[in-house]
Image (tube, rainbow, N blue to C red):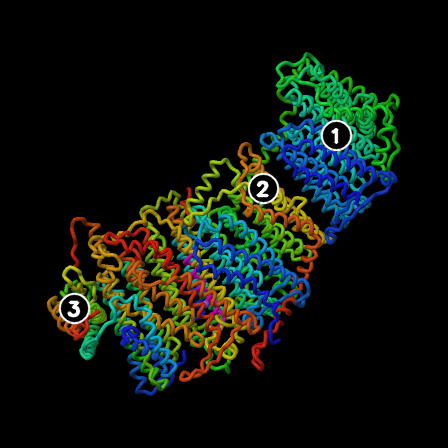
Amino acid sequence: MLLASLVLLPFLGSVLAALMPQDARNRESWLAIGVAVGGLAIAAALFPQVAAGEVVRAEFAWLPAKGLDFVLRVDGLAWVFTVLVLAIGLLVVLYARYYMSPEDPVPRFFAFLLAFMGSMLGVVLSGNLVQLVVFWELTSLTSFLLIGYWHHRADARRGARMAFTVTATGGLCLMAGVLVLGHIVGSYDLDVVLAAGDLIRGHELYLPALVLIALGALTKSAQFPFHFWLPHAMAAPTPVSSYLHSATMVKAGVFLLVRLWPALAGTPEWTWIIGGAGVCTLLIGAFVAIFQHDLKGLLAYSTISHLGLITVLIGIGTPLAIVAAIFHILNHATFKASLFMAAGIIDHETGTRDLRVLRGLRHKLPITATLAIVASAAMAGVPLLNGFLSKEMFFAETLQVGGDLNWWMSYAAVAMGMFSVAYSLRFISVFFGAPAQGLPRDPHEPPRWMRFPVELLVLACLVVGVAPGVSIEPLLHLAVVATLGEAAPVYDLAVWHGLNLPLLMSVCALVGGVALYVVLRRHFDLAQRERVPLIHRLNGAQAYETTMLQLTRGAEWLLRRVGTRRLQPQLMLMMVALLLVPPLLAGVPPAWTAIPLQGFDPLFAGMWLIGAGCALAGAWMAKYHRLAALALVGGTGIVTAATFLWLSAPDLALTQLMVETVTTVLILLGLRWLPPRIESITGSTQPAWRVWTRRGRDLALAVGGGLALAALTYAVLVHPASDTIADFFLLNALSGGGGSNVVNVLLVDFRNFDTLGEITVLAIVALTVYALLRRFRPAPESAGIPPQQRFEGDPASRQNPAEQADRGYLLVPGIYLRLLLPFMGVIAVYFFMRGHNLPGGGFVAGLIFAVAILVQYMLAGTVWVESHLSLRPHRWLGFGLLLACVTGLGAWWFEHPFLTTHTAHVHWPLVGELHLPSAFVFDLGVFAVVVGTTMLMLVALAHQSLRAHRHPGEDAPADGQGGAEGRRL
Amino acid sequence: MSGAESLPWWAAIPVALLLVLGGLITLVGTIGLARLQSFYQRIHGPAITIALGAGCILVASMLYFTVAQSRLVIHELLISVFVLMTAPVVSMLIMRAAVYRDLRAARDMDPGNDAGNS
Amino acid sequence: MRRWLPSPLLSASLLLMWLMLNQTLEPAHWLLGGVLGVLAPLLSRPLQPHGHARIRRPLALFRLLWMAAVEIVRSCFNVTQIILLRRSADVNSQFIRVPLELKSPHGLALLSCLINSTPGTVWVEILPERHELLLHVFDLHDEAWWVHTIKTRYEQPIIEVFETPEPGGSRT
Amino acid sequence: MTTATLLSAASFFALACVVLAMLLCTLRLMVGPSAQDRVLALDTLWMCVMVLALLLGIRHGSQIYFEAALIIALLGFVSTIALAKFLMRGEVIE
Amino acid sequence: MTSLPWLNHLIIVPVLLPLVVGALMIPINQARHGLKFALGLSSGVLLWAVAVALLVLADSGHWPGGIGVYLAANWAAPFGIALVADRLSALMLVLAATIALAVLVFSARRWDRVGVGFHPLFQFLLMGLNGAFLTNDLFNLFVFFEVMLAASYGLVLHGYNLRRIQAGMQYIAVNLVASLLFLIGVSLIYAASGTLNIADLGARVALLGAQDAWLLQIGATVLALAFLTKGAMWPLGFWLPTTYASASAPVGAMLVLMTKVGVYAVLRVWLAVFGEGAGAAEGFGFTALTLGGMATLLFGAIGMLASQDGGRMAGYGAIVSSGTLLAVVGQAGGAVLASGLYYLLGSTLAMAAFMLLIELTERIRPPGAALIAITMEAFAIEDKPEDPVGVGIPGTLAFLGLSFAACALVIAGMPPLSGFVAKFSLFHALLAAAPEAVPATTWMLIGLMILAGLAAIIALMRLGVRTFWAAGAVTPPRLQFSEAAPVGALVLLCVLLTVQAGTVFDYLGRTTAGLLRSGDYAARVLGEPPVLRAPGAEEGAR
Amino acid sequence: MELVLAISVGVVFGAGVWLILRPRTFQLITGLLLMSYAVNLFIFAMGRLWVDKPPITPTPAIDPAQFADPLPQGLVLTAIVIGFATTALYLVIMIGARGLSGSDHVDGEEPRE
Ligand code: NA
Ligand code: NA
């Protein structure tokens, strides 16, 4: 529980901080300090156990099935890092209290900072590798938010994105690596993994795992070639730089390598990958640092270099090297954090961080100058400071690399030492010389408590540097034993080991570094150089930006190749898929050759000569001769209906005929709003060969699709049916469903649930069409009155529709059409009533009824009909659906499932016995929905004419009717 | 192709004759539709089909079912009535559409001259 | 009576149709057909501005229909002959105008049915200015004969059927 | 020869005539040349299918086919007058 | 059995309730938004309660095998249409109801009045979704697909402008063709097997002759093409990003759910038909599904990288999640499937929240642009809406940013939210499925998923930085509580899903175990007896 | 008969496929109509072909083998209705898009080439 609260505390603090008001700078700091102190207290409480060599674990079940429990685990190494995180965190918080401007919205800052602290503790304390990855990515995320804290600045946004992209990508690699590791070991538990080193190193997946984990660690620790994000992260407020980007987060990578040392290290691959990256980083970082003009930039590159140093040590991988690595992690955290804070003070006080401007600050900032110089000396590896000790251990280790004859590692180390002396000198040069003029702000010593963290850290550098054995030795020992276990070496943290090769190397580095600095300054214009000599082309940031840009561009390019926004290619692909995928998966039919040729009916064939001819001709005409195409397609429709009739499906024939009629009227109503396409104005600029290629391809697809469907149809038709559920329907329609027309019984009884859905579709489409037409804006070419109606030669052009029907050319047809109305109505009733036993039913009846009304619309026009008849299709729709539902629900009353049919047997005098199945009422609902739908759609379409129409002779009342249409519908 | 029940000869022969006649008349009507030169001639073809071709078949049907089912089957009359009620409307409207389309086309070709309808 | 049964003839036709459709004479269907025969005209009345036809001389009507039927068969034979045997260009197809006195819409409707059902003639429209019927004739020999025939053999009987004044009532 | 064969032959002949008639209609439907030609052809096609339905009824001695013919007789003209009105007036419902 | 236990009626309520409520709304005057909203919300709340009840019933052992069967119209399966509420369908119902509730609340402010008919269409959409989740009959599935699609056509076009209608044309055309494929597939399956019932099909498949088996496989493949068009598998899903980008926010959120229906249908049909006990056909098409899923995943990742605006990015995100799920279904392992379902839950919730969020974040713009946008929306409104600009609530930007980040994390599969848990458990299960030698496709799949996550990170970060951080563009948007609350609730659900991962996985484990025992499933569905109609009445058992 | 119907289904379907690959909305809607015919016939054919055997069973005691398969007929009926509805919908969208965009291209805008 104690452990859990250690991790939870910062997150809790983060939430609290986020909820505080904008100007609560003091309260925020106190909260953060409280969290850090609290954490330290918990750490202190844990110390006895840890010091005793115990591994304290706390487990919480989360996802046991996946080997994913929430495990916290603290051993020496974790404890030391915990203290590091919390202690530096405490100082940074204190520093930030003074660094942040009163106008800054600090709640966000402290919330993010505390969240980072929690995440970092999570990384350090995770006892489960997956959980470690979680916290790992959380540190990336919080780092992103903190770098982007001043997000109105472009460099902050850019730096944040860059850092996050690189580290999160690394995190993904780490996750993959952890997965592989877990796969090898069979567990993600850290203790299990650490104990399985030999198994891992011997496994065939060792190299992938190593590479993936290394990618994670190296990106996080800003190792070459992923180092470039760190300098750009300096756009963050300085407390963030000092905390995340020097002391803690960037150490997560090397921490991980140290942590996994027992499991992964000890192979040539390890040395080459880790060590190689480290060497490059250490040299490049140190070299580039010399040529920076930004104080923080210089520190950032030096951080990179020092991280490279640590990485090299880990790569070397000997127990002593690991000791040196851990030691240097601690040392670097101390002096670099203080240096960043000093740089922050300079920035804060002078308003600039530009090395080309800053001079002579020791006059105005004497104390800060002293502190910074001492810290720089530690960074340069000057004796009696902590940096010297770990660096000398490093020199000693490099000598071991490659045996006695191989010195390259040592040369590299000395070169790095020289560079670090040079950039340290460059850093402290701001304090010397004549005081700078024209600084943005007049510098003063910072507030007492802002300097306090620096003082404390520099003191630590001194104490460790002078008396390592007393100060750091116990801590280091704790960590080393926890990491190396039995392999822990004997080592001696003393300032003086006598005259030896490492000492010589240190001296060389110091002297060479000073000389290098002087030479560069005197002869190479170090103070004003625009770019880094030799390797300025090696610009990771540029590469990153280019990569990101290319990634987007490439993705766009690729997307155009493998995707489309146009409809035709999509439909084409669907057809291609239809043609290719089924045979690819299912193969060729097993009985292909055995398919017999069946009987041939010349009359039926003649009929389909018509149907197919109409279809082909319709396809040919559809572009320019829409009406002809419509008529031709209608021809196919009639033949289809006739086919249904011929082949024992009278219900289908009736339905098809009615639908055919309604569809024709519907499309004609729509065609009125689609201006004609004139053959002569095809402005296609495409070359002919492309047009023909496309047509050829489409033709091939059409032929292929047709052939495929024909073949399938034939294959089924000549193949005897297997045992189907159809027999049940035939046998039970009359006895169970109470009707002899099995198709209708299917629709209103056996599968009435389908029918319910189907009428819902109708209602939905009607509503949608209505909604669409409410906002319909016709094409300008078709918005006016059609030319036919403007033709003065036609007497009807001077009459409104009602007059045409009353005394115009429609007088005579009108007599018939009006007389037919009651007949059509009765026929609709007839088809409705007989449906259950003979072809017919609610659907056909509904269509007949709707068409009967429609004919009246065609005859006398919308205005006249609606002034004489109020139809309210919405009510028909709603009523029909509800009726169908209520009928179905009636079954609940009889404790039966929804839509179970019941038949009431009523005996009426004179009439006789009446069977009233509930399916009948259900069918009535179908009828109502069909009428409502058809009327709503067609009438809504017809109403569009009223918008444009103002007939010359049309009078005011008619207009009033036109305005009222919306209400009535 | 079974189903046609056995009818006595006295009924079968007229039914067969009516069927053949109806089929032929239907065919003649559409031959007119296909063969004649102008639309105004072609429109006269289907009138035969509708009036007499269908009529023969309807009579044949009535006769056939009345004899075959030994009861009066005359609901085919309804079809005749409906056809007679709707056919005039159809030909009137198609004819009038053709006339005014042609008039309009003539006006568009030769403005100033009001072509008469004869 | 008039209110609930605006057109007994129509109602009777509907009942007849119902019985024919169901091919039955069961009492239940008489009842149902009767109800429908009453309801359908009532419900469709708002859309019937011309009201329903009153046939004043049923006998004259039957005579007319019989004559028309004979004429249809005769014309059918003629037209068939022309279609099968004559070259299209030789056929003298013409529009003709027939001045009409018949005003009753129902009468005009009947006339149109007879003319259109007769192969060889198609009704185009009634030209509003002079109340002339525009007619298309498939094979025209003599325009005056046509005008005369239509006026005497068709128009006069129809006027007789529909426009004979009835004492005490006026046409709707 | 029985009456059944006679009727079968007669109905086959009539069906053949009707199918041929339909073919001729289709020819006109495809060729045009004017829109009214197509409308006329389509209407005639409907009528032919009506006759076809009646003939099938006779051929199979079944009344099942009657309703299809009835529907065509009563409502087959609707799409034709819609087309005709469209040609004449530029819209179906004014 | 002479009467149906009343609890069983609950199974059909998710279909029936929205139908009745939608039907009731049709005749109501368009101006009465309040009434319609109240009706819709009541329906939503009730639906949610019913869905949860079904989940509890399915999981509590109330029904044998955790499978509740409802015989619509009281005809025994496979003759009648059987609805099946098992753990999976109950889970999907809960998911649908949850998102629907959020969307409904979200749209209360103004979306329901930019056109007519929003509320009834929304109810019908729910009916279609729920029906598709519940039905066990292939043709009934078609009908419910059509109900769902028809409603979605209306909703996609809701309050249409040029962009929306262009997208709508594409969406509708593609889906109409897909529906034709659906019909071809279903009818072929019927021709081959003589049944439409999915469970019955599974029971029959092993007994089919060679020719019938071939026809069945062809039919199933064509059917799958239809499902996968709706589920947006590459190269059938190009309609999706365009549609997402142009649909209004609430509709977009519902579309997220609809893509999942395609995947769900594949899962249901394939496991029942080609799962264990399918004889020679066992495992048919699974590999193709994996490969297709991987191609889809890759395509979605590329699309995310290439997209600049939120709607389109969300669309490609949905494609990524579809691809992942399809690949997972293709793996057909129990543990893999459970992880896949977990992924489905998280990604659906997050994507829905993201769709809503995008609309809100689009208000973070220079005032001019926002004003123009609002005016343009208002211009198209005929019913004179109330002023869409409300009173800002404090911290709106923080709220939006936080929600955005949370959605982005889930979508990209980054720690610590459910997306990561899902991905990790998927990887774990995939690797664990092959303890000896992991096949190359598995490695490829894992690699692709990681890459897709990376692409998502990059794309979403770019979008987020532009939206929330771009200099000078940030004006605190005005936000209604009714708009913020649904987004917040969905995000919180993602968090809850993470925290309660153990519980959820337990449930999913039981779910997949049931799914993989297709024999038990068939026995349960086909064995459900109808209620006796009347004493002595003839009953239709085969 | 079987062969004729199979070929017919193929021809109509092929004509529909050709049309849905065309660029104009009217072509697309015509293609969808034709494809629906073909698919409806296809579904219908899945119950095999029967002449003069409509699934109307006047008495309960029957031989199911003497009747056409009613199930595909029921399915076709539903498919016809749904097809009708969706055609209507696409039609309205088609004219709506034409009005808004000034183009009858299926993408709602003329291709930029
Ligand atoms: Na060496
Ligand atoms: Na139906």
Which class describes the residues within 10 Å of circle 2: few (<14), some (14-19), or many (20+)? Answer: many
Give percent across and percent down for residue A503: 83, 22
Hey, which quadrant is residue A473 in on the image?
Answer: top right
F57 vs F14, nearest the viewer: F57
Residue at x-position 58% and y-position 63%:
E134
Magenta stretch, overall SS: helix
Q: Chain of mark 2?
A: E
Q: For the view shown, which residue lies furthest in the left direction?
A: C144
Type of amino acid at the residue the image marks with label 3: Leu
> Whereabouts is ligand 2, in terms of quadrant?
bottom left
Vertical side of C87 occupied by E301: above or below: above
Q: Chain of mark 1?
A: A
**CB-based contact (under 8 Å), mark 3 and mark 2:** no
Q: Which residue is mark 1?
A: A91
Q: Chain of mark 3?
A: C
Query: Magenta segment: does it hold D34?
Result: no
Image quadrant where one finds the C terminus of chain A = bottom left
Q: Which residue is mark 3?
A: C102
Residue at x-position 50% and y-position 72%:
A749
Vertical side of E457 occupied by B34: above or below: below
Query: In the rendered image, is residue C115 in sight?
Result: no
Q: CA distance from mark 3 to mark 2?
A: 81 Å
Region in magenta: F68-89
Hey, which quadrant is residue C19 in on the image?
Answer: bottom left
**CB-based contact (under 8 Å), mark 1 and mark 2:** no
